[in-house]
Image (spheres, grey):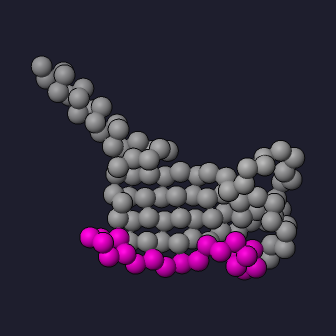
Amino acid sequence: MKNRIGLAISAVALLLLAGGTTGCIYTHTVSPLGRNMHATEMAKSSGQGDIKQIAIQGISVTWGDNALGEIARKNGISELLYADQELLSVFGIWRQETIHLYGR
């Protein structure tokens, strides 16, 4: 009986703490912003910008900047080759979205 309870608790914890997928407690994913992955040159420079958000009981505060043009300008990128989006969420309260740009 103890083994079944321990197994059930482990299964629920695994589902709730699943990293790399959308978990209820913690989510951390990185995905490309573009769809054309063929014949993409390697980037010589990169930059990133992010937006952070805290939401508690319907009240949300957001700050930061992840505009592609602004990130490129700040990092001296004149030609954008590709970009990635990184998402981090904890308990649905803390959310951070980071855009990674690669170009020349």
Q: Look at 39% across and 65% down and name the residue there.
A: 94
> Could one spot residue 75 in this view of the protein?
no
Q: Is residue 8 above or below residue 20?
A: above
Q: Position of residue 74 (x, y in %)?
A: 72, 80
Q: Quadrant of the C terminus?
A: bottom right
Residue visible at 36% across and 60% down in the picture: 92
Residue range highlighted in magenta: 55-75
Q: Is 1 left, or right, of 92 in this rendering?
A: left
Q: Front-most of 35 and 86?
A: 35
Residue at position x 49%, y 52% in the image: 28
Specify whether 46 is left or right of 14. Answer: right
Check residue 95 for magenta coloring. Answer: no
Position of residue 19 measured from the top left corner of the image (x, y, whole percent) = 45, 44
Q: Is residue 97 above or below residue 70?
A: above
- Spot the residue most to the left: 1
Q: Is residue 54 left or right of residue 104?
A: left
x%, y% of residue 9?
Answer: 23, 33
Q: Is 76 rendered above or below residue 81?
A: below
Q: Position of residue 1 (x, y in %)?
A: 12, 19
Q: How many marks on residues?
A: 0
Inspect the magenta stretch and tell me whether residue 66 lies in it.
yes
Q: Can the viewer see residue 41?
A: yes
Residue at point 41% right, 42% down?
A: 18
- In the image, residue 24 sits, relative to residue 102, either above or below, namely above
- Location of residue 73 (image quadrant): bottom right
